[in-house]
Image (cartoon, rainbow, N blue to C red):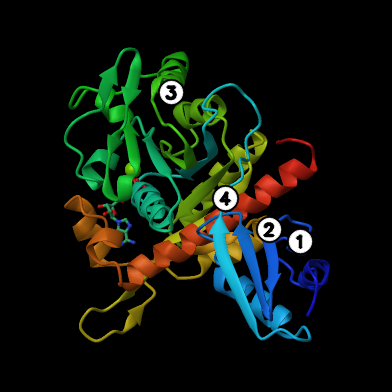
């Protein structure tokens, strides 16, 4: 029967596909025990939304079963999200802040923010959404939140939505139809106030829906919030892509890590015959990602269930959990989560984090 050391030695041959580093060196192997002809191992993932969960578990099992004298292998998979952030003082309980941005409005930025947040929370991650789009704060509508946040003393308690996600919107501070004339310092102060006064508690991921474009507001916001990285949303058309590229370059200049780009409204599946129409020219974003040296995070179909349910305050992940649209959002959420783990790992390597 192999010893604990034999088990650990054997597990050094299992490599995390994203980092290219073995799982023992990454500290993912916990609680190794052997009893009779049974080995028990706990595998700790860096995110519960890990796209390689079953692949890694399967590899651990097959490597250990090959050891002489072993007849049973029990692998317990757990997850603990590591904080990407350094001690900047604000929001110590929030491990990762992910911004969602776009070159222009109407490309599905808020829809993505909500569905990705819900997909992450389904896996067991604790998630918050900050609606920081001062031009069109639509998150409360998409999540059908009618009442604003409660305040307790000088703290603001966020609204709670589906799957227990915590939601705060800059819209709660605006009167209906009030023209937004907020500029630099005002926006910065309001956002700082959100970040410091809102009781987010412990969060694995805080998703921030930024205003569209590369104007004053997005720029100021991106600089006021300690972001782990930014996800850019674009539709496949040339024009949309050019504008998205401009946004990407702005974030690069600001030294904000680019997590990757999502292609929304990629293709349309006819609900009657199932025929796929590539209305706006599917695949444009993927090609652009290669050119720009950034990660392609996936595509979302143009689908009536996304619009109808979103407009009714019932996001597609909740309304149609088995649909193709939902699966698309899940794949993107897992790709984002694993990219964020990689960013965290690299920052630690450079002595940035704890
Ligand atoms: N993939 C999609 N299929 C169908 N409708 C979509 C899709 N993505 C977004 N929409 C719809 O398009 C409109 C704009 O989306 P929204 O998320 O509000 O964009 P943004 O936040 O970028 O302005 C909304 O009515 C939304 O329901
Ligand atoms: Mg929006």
Tell which of 332 and 51 is nearer to you: 51
Q: Residue at x 33, y 32 (%)?
A: 168
**Sooner in the amino-acid sequence: mark 3 or mark 1:** 1
C-alpha separation, residue under disc 2 versus residue under disc 3: 36 Å
Q: Nearer the viewer, mark 3 or mark 4?
A: 4
SS at mark 3? helix
C-alpha separation, residue under disc 3 versus residue under disc 4: 28 Å
Residue at the spot of label 2: 28
Residue at the spot of label 3: 191
Tell which of 133 and 169 is nearer to you: 169
Q: Is residue 326 above or below residue 225?
A: below
Residue 68 shows up from this direction? yes
Which of the 4 image quadrants contains residue 138?
Answer: top left
C-alpha separation, residue under disc 2 versus residue under disc 4: 10 Å
Residue at the spot of label 1: 24
Q: Residue furthest front?
A: 36
Q: Quadrant of the C terminus?
A: top right
Residue at the spot of label 4: 80
C-alpha separation, residue under disc 3 versus residue under disc 1: 40 Å
C-alpha separation, residue under disc 1 versus residue under disc 2: 6 Å
């Amino acid at each position: 029967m192999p010893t604990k050391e034999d088990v650990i030695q054997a597990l050094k041959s299992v490599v995390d596909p994203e980092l290219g580093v073995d799982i023992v060196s990454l500290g993912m192997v916990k609680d190794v025990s052997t009893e009779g002809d049974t080995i028990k191992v706990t595998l700790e993932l860096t995110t519960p939304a890990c796209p390689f969960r079953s692949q890694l578990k399967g590899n651990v099992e097959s490597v250990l079963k090959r050891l002489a004298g072993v007849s049973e292998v029990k692998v317990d998979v757990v997850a603990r999200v590591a904080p990407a952030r350094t001690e900047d003082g604000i929001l110590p309980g929030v491990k990762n802040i992910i911004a969602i941005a776009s070159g222009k409005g109407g490309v599905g930025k808020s829809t993505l923010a909500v569905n990705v947040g819900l997909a992450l929370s389904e896996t067991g991650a604790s998630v918050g959404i900050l609606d920081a789009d001062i031009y069109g704060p639509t998150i409360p509508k998409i999540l059908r939140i009618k009442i604003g946040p409660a305040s307790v003393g000088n703290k603001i308690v966020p609204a709670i939505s589906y799957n227990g996600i915590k939601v705060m919107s800059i819209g709660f501070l605006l009167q209906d139809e009030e023209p937004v004339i907020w500029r630099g310092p005002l926006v910065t102060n309001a956002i700082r106030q959100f970040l410091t006064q809102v009781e987010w508690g412990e969060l694995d991921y805080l998703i921030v829906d930024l205003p569209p474009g590369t104007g004053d507001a997005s720029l100021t916001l991106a600089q006021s919030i300690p972001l782990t990285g930014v996800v850019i949303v674009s539709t496949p058309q040339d024009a949309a892509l050019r504008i998205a590229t401009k946004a990407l370059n702005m974030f690069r200049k600001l030294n904000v890590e680019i997590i990757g780009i999502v292609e929304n409204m990629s293709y349309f599946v006819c609900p009657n015959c199932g025929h796929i129409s590539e209305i706006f020219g599917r695949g444009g974003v993927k090609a652009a990602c290669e050119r720009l040296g950034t990660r392609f995070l996936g595509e979302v179909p143009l689908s009536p269930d996304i619009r109808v349910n979103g407009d009714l305050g019932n996001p597609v992940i909740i309304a149609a959990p088995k649909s193709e649209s939902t699966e698309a959002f899940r794949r993107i959420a897992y790709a984002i989560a694993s990219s964020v783990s990689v960013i965290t790992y690299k920052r630690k390597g450079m002595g940035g984090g704890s």
